[in-house]
Image: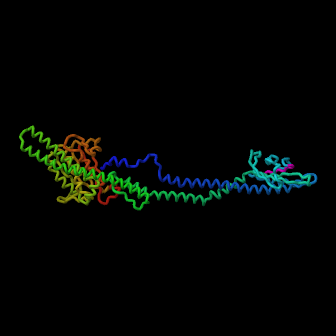
C-alpha cells in the first residue's frame, strides 16, 4: 500500500470539526432573507391595514356624531334633545363593540349620554364643525377599555349670545382590530400566497441540491476509493467551479502517484541489483563447502550460505510485493484463467519441497466434482492476473510447509461458492496453529509470529496485497484439535459490485 510523503500530507486541507455544511449555509442565506422579507411585509401590511381601519372607523364616528348633533336643537329656553330611548338602545345594543356618546354644553359639562367619556386634551382649541379624533380609556363593568373617540364642537344660539355644544361619539377598538386582522390575513397571509412561498422554498431547496450534486458526486468518487487508488477524477459534466476543484485534486493525486511510482521503481531496481551478487555469493559458498574439509570453516560457510539464501528470498518477496502494487497490476494486465488447474499445477510442483521438509502435501477434490474415475473436475474461471494469483497461493502453501512442522498434513482445496458468486481456495495444515490474538497481525509486513523457520515476514503480506488487488479477501481460522486454515476468496466473473465487495 503506498505511503504518502510528508510533504504531500502537509499540502492536504485540514477540515475543522466545526465546519458548517455548505448546503445549510446556502439554504440559510436564501430562505432566511425570504422569511424576513415576508415577515417585514406582514408587519407593514398590518400597519397599513390598521391605518385604513382607523380611517373607516373615524369616518363612521364622524357621521354618527353629526347625526347625534342633529338630534339636539336649540330653543329659546335651552336645548331640545330629540333622542328617543329606542334609538339609544339601538346604539348601545352590541356588547362586543359598544358605542358610547356624550353631549355637553358648554363643552365638558355633561348633558346626555355616558358621562365617563373624557374630553379632548384642549377643548378651547377645537375648531367648530371640524371633528377631532383621539384614543381614550373608559371604565366599564368589564374593566377599563380603549375606545376611539370623535368629538365635534357646534355653535348655537343668537349672534352675540351664542353658545357652544360638544358631541362625542366613541367606539371600542374591537371592530378596528378585527378589520385590521382581516386585512392582514387577506393581504399578507392568503392561501395562494402561502402556497407560492412554500413552492418557492421548495424550488430553492431543489436548486441548492441540484447545484451541489456535482460536489456529492465528487465526494462519492473520492470516498469510495481505496487508499491506493490514485486514478484521476472525472467530472467533465460538472460546473466550472467543481471542475477546478477536481483538477486540483487530480494534480495532488498525480504528485502522489509519481511519488509512489518512484518508491516502487527504487524497490524494483534495488532488488534487481541485489539478486546478481547474492546469487554469486550463494554459488561461491556452495563451491567452498565442497572444497573444504575443515568442520569449523564449513559451519561458517553454511551460515553464510543460509544468510545469502534468506536475503535472496527477501529480495524475491520484495519484487513480488512491488508487482502487487496497483500501478504494477494495471501494467501487467488481467485475463480469464482456470483457477482450479492453476492450483493443481502449483500443488504438484511444491510436493517435492514438502517431502523434503517432512510434510505431506496433497489436493482435496470437493465432493460431487469429478467423481467419475478419470474425469477432470470442472473448470473454475476467474478474471485476474494469473501470475500474481499463483504467487499468492504459492506463498500460502510455502507458509504452511515452513511452519506446520515435520509429519504435518497440508491439504489444498478449491471450491465454488455459488451463493456469494466467489471462488474459494483453502490451505489446511495440521501444525501447531496460529494463536487467535495474532490472526490480524500476521498479514502485516515483516511480522513474524515465531523466530523459527527461514521466512522474512512478507509472505502473508504479499498474499493480502495481491488478493485485495483482485477484490478478494484472505482469512485465517484455527482448526480443531490443532492446525490452521488459510482461505482466499475471489469474485467470479459477472459478480455485482456488492458481491465483489467494491
* Closer to us: 181 or 29: 29
- Residue 191 relative to residue 71: left or right: left
Give how far across and how far down residue 85 sits, in percent.
85, 53
Q: Is residue 367 visible?
A: yes
Residue at horizontal 34%, vertical 46%?
Answer: 6
Q: Is residue 238 magenta?
A: no
- Bounds of the magenta segment: 99-106
Residue at horizontal 70%, vertical 53%?
Answer: 177
Give how far across and how far down residue 270 sits, in percent.
22, 49
Q: Is residue 117 visible?
A: no
Quadrant of the image containing the C terminus: bottom left
What secondary structure is the stretch in magenta mostly built from?
Answer: strand
- Residue 310 relative to residue 489: left or right: left
* Closer to us: 206 or 218: 218
* Closer to us: 84 or 387: 387
Outermost residue, right direction? 76
| Colour convention | rainbow
- Residue 327 relative to residue 157: left or right: left
Quarter of the view holding residue 455: top left
Give how far across and how far down residue 346 sits, in percent.
19, 54
Give how far across and how far down residue 459 sits, in percent.
23, 47
- Residue 204 relative to residue 392: left or right: right
Outermost residue, top direction? 296
Measured along the vertical axis of the image, is residue 218 above or below residue 448?
below
Amino acid at each position: 500500500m503506498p505511503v504518502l510523503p510528508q510533504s504531500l500530507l502537509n499540502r492536504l486541507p485540514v477540515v475543522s470539526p466545526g465546519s458548517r455544511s455548505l448546503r445549510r449555509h446556502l439554504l440559510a442565506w436564501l430562505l432566511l432573507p425570504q422569511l424576513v422579507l415576508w415577515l417585514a411585509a406582514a408587519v407593514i401590511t398590518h400597519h397599513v391595514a390598521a391605518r385604513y381601519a382607523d380611517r373607516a372607523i373615524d369616518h363612521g364616528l364622524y357621521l354618527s356624531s353629526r347625526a347625534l348633533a342633529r338630534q339636539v336643537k336649540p330653543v329659546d329656553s335651552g336645548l331640545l334633545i330629540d333622542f328617543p330611548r329606542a334609538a339609544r338602545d339601538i346604539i348601545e345594543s352590541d356588547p362586543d363593540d359598544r358605542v358610547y356618546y356624550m353631549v355637553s354644553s358648554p363643552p365638558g359639562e355633561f348633558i346626555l349620554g355616558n358621562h365617563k367619556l373624557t374630553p379632548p386634551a384642549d377643548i378651547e382649541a377645537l375648531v367648530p364643525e371640524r371633528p377631532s379624533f383621539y384614543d381614550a380609556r373608559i371604565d366599564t363593568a368589564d374593566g377599563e377599555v380603549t375606545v376611539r373617540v370623535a368629538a365635534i364642537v357646534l355653535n348655537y344660539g343668537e349672534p352675540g349670545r351664542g353658545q357652544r355644544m360638544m358631541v362625542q361619539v366613541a367606539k371600542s377598538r374591537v371592530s378596528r382590530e378585527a378589520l385590521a386582522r382581516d386585512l392582514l390575513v387577506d393581504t399578507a397571509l392568503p392561501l395562494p400566497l402561502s402556497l407560492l412561498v412554500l413552492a418557492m422554498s421548495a424550488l430553492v431547496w431543489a436548486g441548492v441540491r441540484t447545484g451541489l450534486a456535482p460536489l456529492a458526486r465528487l465526494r462519492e468518487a473520492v470516498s469510495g476509493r481505496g487508499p491506493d487508488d490514485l486514478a484521476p477524477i472525472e467530472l467533465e459534466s460538472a460546473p466550472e467551479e467543481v471542475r477546478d476543484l477536481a483538477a486540483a485534486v487530480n494534480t495532488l493525486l498525480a504528485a502522489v502517484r509519481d511519488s509512489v511510482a518512484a518508491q516502487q521503481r527504487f524497490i524494483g531496481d534495488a532488488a534487481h541489483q541485489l539478486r546478481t551478487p547474492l546469487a554469486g555469493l550463494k554459488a561461491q559458498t556452495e563451491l567452498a563447502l565442497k572444497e573444504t574439509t575443515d568442520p569449523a570453516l564449513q559451519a561458517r560457510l553454511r551460515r553464510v550460505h543460509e544468510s545469502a539464501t534468506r536475503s535472496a528470498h527477501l529480495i524475491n518477496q520484495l519484487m513480488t510485493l512491488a508487482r502487487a502494487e496497483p500501478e504494477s497490476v494495471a501494467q501487467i494486465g488481467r485475463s480469464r484463467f482456470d483457477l482450479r488447474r492453476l492450483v493443481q499445477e502449483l500443488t504438484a510442483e511444491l510436493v517435492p519441497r514438502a517431502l523434503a521438509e517432512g510434510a505431506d502435501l496433497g489436493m482435496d477434490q470437493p465432493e460431487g466434482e469429478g467423481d467419475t474415475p478419470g474425469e477432470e473436475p470442472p473448470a473454475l474461471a476467474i478474471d485476474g492476473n494469473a501470475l500474481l494469483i499463483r504467487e499468492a497461493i504459492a506463498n500460502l502453501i510455502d507458509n504452511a510447509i515452513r511452519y506446520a512442522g515435520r509429519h504435518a498434513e497440508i491439504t489444498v482445496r478449491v471450491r465454488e461458492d455459488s451463493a456469494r458468486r466467489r471462488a474459494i481456495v483453502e490451505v489446511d495444515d495440521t501444525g501447531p496453529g496460529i494463536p487467535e490474538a495474532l490472526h490480524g497481525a500476521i498479514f502485516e509486513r515483516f511480522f513474524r509470529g515465531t523466530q523459527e523457520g527461514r521466512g522474512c515476514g512478507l509472505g502473508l503480506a504479499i498474499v493480502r496485497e495481491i488478493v485485495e488487488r483482485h477484490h478478494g479477501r484472505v482469512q485465517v481460522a484455527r482448526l480443531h484439535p490443532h492446525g490452521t486454515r488459510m482461505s482466499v476468496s475471489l469474485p467470479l466473473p459477472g459478480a455485482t459490485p456488492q458481491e465483489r465487495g467494491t
